Image (cartoon, grey):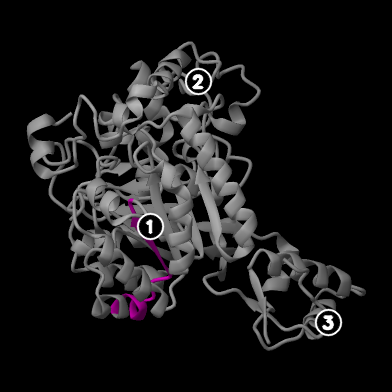
Amino acid sequence: MSEVTVDVASIPAVGRGFRLQWEPAQNAHVLLYPEGMIKLNGSAGEIMKRCDGIASIAQITADLERAFAAKGLTNDVVGFVRIAVEKSWLTLQP
Amino acid sequence: MADLATVVARLAPSPAPAATAPGPPLWLLLELTYKCPLHCAFCYNPTNYVAGTGPELDTADWIRVLREARAMGAVQLGLSGGEPLTRDDLEVIVAEAHQLGFYTNLITSGVGLNEPRIRALKDAGLDHIQLSFQDSTKELNDFLSSTRTFDLKSKVAALIKQYEFPMVLNVVLHRLNIDHVEEILEMAHKLGAEYVELANSQYYGWAFHNRDQLLPSREQVQRAEAVMQRFRERVGSSMRIFFVVPDYFENRPKPCMNGLGSIFLTITPDGTALPCHAARMLPGLQFPNVRDTGVSDIWLKSTGFTHFRGDAWMKEPCRSCPEKSKDFGGCRCQAFLLTGDAANADPVCALSPHHHLVTEAVAKASQPQSNQPLVVEKPLVFRTDRNSSTLFPCKH
């Protein structure tokens, strides 16, 4: 399979058959899929909950940098989205 | 249905929660009924399900269980049986579960899944359907399930796609169909399954009773695994293939249920709460009924859930084993079934003094004369009400 192209203009959304939700009992965002669950760490949860199929990676990154008073998160976000797309957790809008 | 040990492995957070602070029952499996139009010879349901179990819970009981388990943090819901579609309140149960925030999985033979029902289930918020096939050929599918269901299942698979459900195709593998793995995978690919579960039969319930006829040879298992690997490389992520390890052919035991009482809670049709779907056989433990005990008390206080949680129960060779936190000593039910003591190491483990019980069964299965599937001295015993009543008339 060819490498997925992910850049700041990409618009990610949660993949079909997956559902993202906050679980108080686990104090974490979890990604649910057929008969399985991925418990996300804090960063992954913060990125994924912003993947609404409308915001671009540039917008998601800007929002994260604002929310956490951080800078230079672009590579982290792009890197995470690339992995998540490979795993089908996220899909990119055409 | 699927081998849940693997399903749980996929779900399991690592490492396992400590015995002192049990996490929530993340995985709730409701066996809504033992009624089933199929009569599979490898069914894991108890062989004495007719005489040994009570009347089915009603809708209000199931809804109460859903609410109590969700409040504790249960998040994945399996709706199974028997055939869950034989319950006419399935849609009501799904709707409640969806509204509570469960990810809802219907585990079905497909029999009874017509267009009005699948539409109603979609409207109720059902997330996913796991459809079982018994083989890639009509003849063997119908023989193994002792029904004529192959064509119907193919139609149901098309309906599942039409209504845009993610589809897991589950095929239980054993000696009679394991040589068809390539055809089974082709069929799954053609039907558009996103996931395929090749679930090598695990030997409990009816499958244990029929073990001599179902256990494949080591060569069959190796061939199947090689075929599966090639297919996996060919199709990539368009269809994910899970290969449930045939544990009789292993030297290390499976981390069954991620340890009993760790993440998994089953409620049987009559309301008995179990830490795994086969655990009713384990002696000396309390398995409370949800009709009179709350889910929280069941999970936190009953010995059926606390006794094998953690590792205080372990004997040697498990107790001092460096892998005990990885495999939890294997399967308690298998240890009990094969050695008579549920606290023994799972005999699949090469370190178990009872390992020969497994290797002998495998050696027997690998003898050439037993490779003639339909010429067997002992006939396959299909899971029917009549067989259950006549062959297994006792409560325990």
* Among numbered discs 2 and 1, the one appearing first in the sequence: 1
Going 75% across and 71% down the picture, which residue do you hit?
Answer: A81
Q: Amino acid at mark 3?
A: Val
Disc 3 designates what residue?
A: A8
Q: Secondary structure at mark 1?
A: strand
> Do we see residue B285 in this rendering?
no
Chain for disc number 2: B
Disc 1 designates what residue?
A: B78
Q: Give me the C-alpha separation between circle 3 and circle 1.
A: 39 Å
Which corner quadrant of the image does residue B341 belong to?
Answer: top left
Q: Which mark is residue B315?
A: none
Given residues B255 and B146, the one toward you in this image is: B146
Given residues B4 and B289, the one toward you in this image is: B4
Judged left or right of residue B212, residue A20 is right
Rendering coords of residue B130 (x, y %): 39, 61
Q: Is residue B363 above or below residue A78?
A: above
Q: Are marks 3 and 2 in contact (CB under 8 Å)?
A: no
Judged left or right of residue B125, residue B13 is right
Q: Secondary structure at mark 3?
A: loop
Q: Give me the C-alpha separation between circle 2 and circle 1.
A: 30 Å
